[in-house]
Image (cartoon, rainbow, N blue to C red):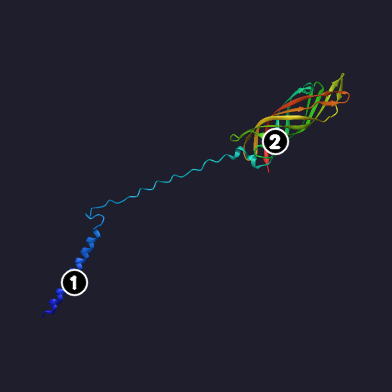
Amino acid sequence: MKYPLKISKNILSLVLATGLFISTGSVAQDYNVENPNNRPVPRKTTPAARPVEPQTAAPEKSSVSSPSDYLRHSLTLAFGQSYLFGDFSDLGEEKVIIDLFYHYRASYIFQFQLNIHSHEFNMNGQSIRLSSANAAIKAKLYDFDSFAPYVFGGLGLYWPEAERFLSSTLTNTDSNTSMGLNGGAGMDLFLNQKFATGFMLHYHLPFRAKYDNQPSLSGHYMKLLVTLTYSFM
């Protein structure tokens, strides 16, 4: 019978055609149109990403240098040496005194300052009491870290009251009100958000006080003070 043989030839032809198709497809994959010689093409390598260095934030300005910028009110307790001049120096000796100040911060630079004091000085049986309520404008010059120098100046009311010898008689003068000038300079060192310490030079120049049937009284005085300030609200 010739049919089996014919079928075998057909199967053989189909197998050969399938093998040729697979072989042709494999060659086509290896053949590159842009590289007809089929030479190996070097791979394109992407540069490695540079490591991102962590950015450090710029240092913030220290808030300790001006804590009272956010606190409007402050009280200052001051103590130090007083110095008398003019008629005042003939009636009393210099001594250590205590002063009280109130400040209200109106802006970053300017403050309103109020000072109240009353001091009595004695010498050789005579005495003089210097009382005052004075106001000034305080201006900060600049900030250097926690350090802030300042100047101030203003007007005040003064009540000099003396006990002195007139014609060998110890005589009391009446309390007479007079205006006067005050001014000075100082420096603050801020310790934290609420407390500061520093130094102050405070000068007072009361105008001449005149009395009936008594000589007038004139003089001026100065204080060198250590300050401790508490800020609030």
Q: Residue furthest bottom?
A: 1
Tell me what residue is drawn at x 13 percent, y 79 percent: 3
Secondary structure beneath dot 2 equals strand
Relative to residue 83, is residue 195 drawn left or right? left
Q: Residue under circle 1?
A: 14
Q: Is residue 15 left or right of residue 209?
A: left
Q: Earlier in the sequence, mark 1 or mark 2?
A: 1
For disc 1, the neighbor class at 10 Å (few under 14, some 14 to 19, many from 20) is: few
Crowd rating for badge 2 (residues with CA inside 10 Å; few <14, some 14–19, many 20+): some
Q: Nearer the viewer, mark 1 or mark 2?
A: 1
Quarter of the figure with residue 170: top right
The percent position of residue 54, horizontal first and vertical second, equals 46, 45
Q: Which mark is residue 233?
A: none
| 179 with respect to 4 (left or right) | right
x, y (%) of residue 111? 69, 37
Q: As rendered, which of 198 and 61 lies closer to the eye?
A: 61
**What residue is disc 2 on?**
76
Q: SS of the residue at dot 1?
A: helix
Q: Residues at badges 1 and 2 in contact (C-beta under 8 Å)?
A: no
The residue at 18%/71% (across/down) is: 14
Closest to the observer: 165 or 109? Answer: 109
**Image quadrant of residue 172?**
top right
Three-letter residue code for mark 2: Thr
Look at label 1 and name its amino acid.
Answer: Leu
Residue 216 x %, y %: 83, 24
Which residue is situated farthest in the top direction here?
168
